[in-house]
Every structure is written in C-alpha cells, then in structure tokens.
Amino acid sequence: MGAKADIAKPSKPRVAMHKFSSCDGCQLAFLNMGEGLLTLAERVDLVYFAEAGTLDESGGFDVSFVEGSIATPEDVERIQRIRSNSRVLVATGSCATAGGIQALRNGADTAQWIAQLYAHPEAISASADSTPMAAHVQVDFELWGCPVNSQQILAVVNALLLGATPRDSADKVCVE
Ligand code: SF4
C-alpha cells in the first residue's frame, strides 16, 4: 500500500504506540514481549508510548503502531496528524482494523444512548460510529487479533529493520 518498508538508517528508528478508543490490551502485548522488548530497545527508540511513560512527538515517527478505533471528532484530527508524522503506520488489533467492540453501537442511535446514560450528555464527545483507522487515513499494514500477540509486533519491526515488507503468514502474523 505504498509504504516505504526500509526504516533502517544510521540513527535508531523512532517507534511509537498510539492509543485511541480501546482497552489497552494491545499495548500490553507490546510490553509483554519479555526478552524481545529488550532486544528491540537496542535497535529502535521507543519514543512515544503512554503505557511506558514516554511521549516524545518532536521528531516524527518511523513506525507508528496505532491501537484503538476512531470514535470522536477529535480522534479524526489526531489520526490525520499522526499519519502525516509517520513513515509507516500499522493498525494494531481488532479495534484499529475493524472498529472493535465499540462498533456494536454503529447500528444504534449513539446520541440517544448518550442521553440515556449520562447526566450531562452535552459533555460527551462521540462520533455516531466507531470506525477503523483505514476509514480515515492510509494504513500500511494491519495486525489482526484481540489482542494482537507480541510476536506479530516483533515480526513487523524486524522486517522493516531489514528493509523487507512484512507479509502475511500461516499464523496471520501480518497482513498488508
Ligand atoms: Fe483491547 Fe482487543 Fe481492542 Fe486490542 S483489539 S485494544 S485487546 S479490545
């Protein structure tokens, strides 16, 4: 889908994990890599990852993993900003690739639900539907799963570091 697969360069590639509407489970899969995470830390700079306490947006991103669905008007603006600051964007998990469990509301009247559930519905910002990343920006790769597993993430990063295009495999590691 037009991604520049080669992210290898003299300085370490800048990798980010962004969160949208989600349960954080895919971020935890990233953190649960165990030894793989230590190896990864030697090869890339994990510059933006809320769960890991690092939020450096200053230099853009070589690879942005994105967890969660687009569920508010603010989300739309934010994913467009992330896309323009990222060389490669990877939709990570079922929320990001299909809208997630939040998309159950898509067949209902979201405004009516909000009015019934919240004392101050005017304070709630929500789009009518929960939508996947690809509905709003170009997505270079998708990782399927709820949650994804650590090996899927590692496989994508390793392939990109080698200048290879992550490919679909028998165990659905990655889908371009
Ligand atoms: Fe959580 Fe599943 Fe969404 Fe990942 S895909 S953030 S595990 S609900």
Image (spheres, rainbow, N blue to C red):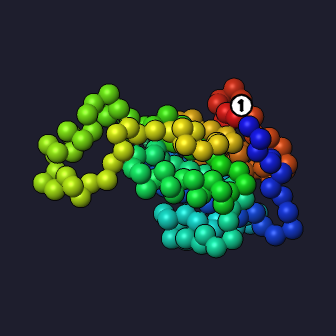
Percent coordinates x, y for residue 101 in the rendering = 38, 36
Q: Is residue 11 visible?
A: yes
Query: Is residue 136 or residue 105 the one in the foreground?
Result: 136
Percent coordinates x, y for residue 62 in the rendering = 72, 59
Residue at left 46%, top 38%?
131
Query: Residue 138 occupies which quadrant of the picture?
Result: top right
Query: Is residue 44 or residue 80 the one in the foreground?
Result: 80
Rendered-image quadrant of the C terminus: top right
Q: Which residue is mark 1?
A: 168
- Please indicate whether residue 12 sits to the left or right of residue 109 in the image: right
Rendered-image quadrant of the N terminus: top right
- Please indicate whether residue 167 sits to the left or right of residue 72 in the image: right
Measured along the vertical axis of the image, is residue 157 above or below residue 167? below
Going by the numbered disc 1, the residue's amino acid type is: Asp
Residue at left 64%, top 73%?
58
Residue at left 55%, top 71%?
54
Asked whether mark 1 and ligand 1 are closer than 8 Å, the reply comes as no
Query: Is residue 112 or residue 160 the one in the foreground?
Result: 112
Measured along the vertical axis of the image, is residue 158 above or below residue 45? above
As helix, strand or loop, the secondary structure at mark 1 comes to: loop
Query: Is residue 115 or residue 101 the one in the foreground?
Result: 115
Percent coordinates x, y for residue 160 in the rendering = 78, 49
Percent coordinates x, y for residue 143 in the rendering = 60, 39
Residue at left 69%, top 26%?
170
| Image quarter for ligand 1 | top left
Q: Is residue 25 visible?
A: no
Measured along the vertical axis of the image, is residue 94 above or below residue 160? above
- Is the residue marked by circle 1 packed among few (<14), some (14-19), or many (20+) residues within 10 Å? some
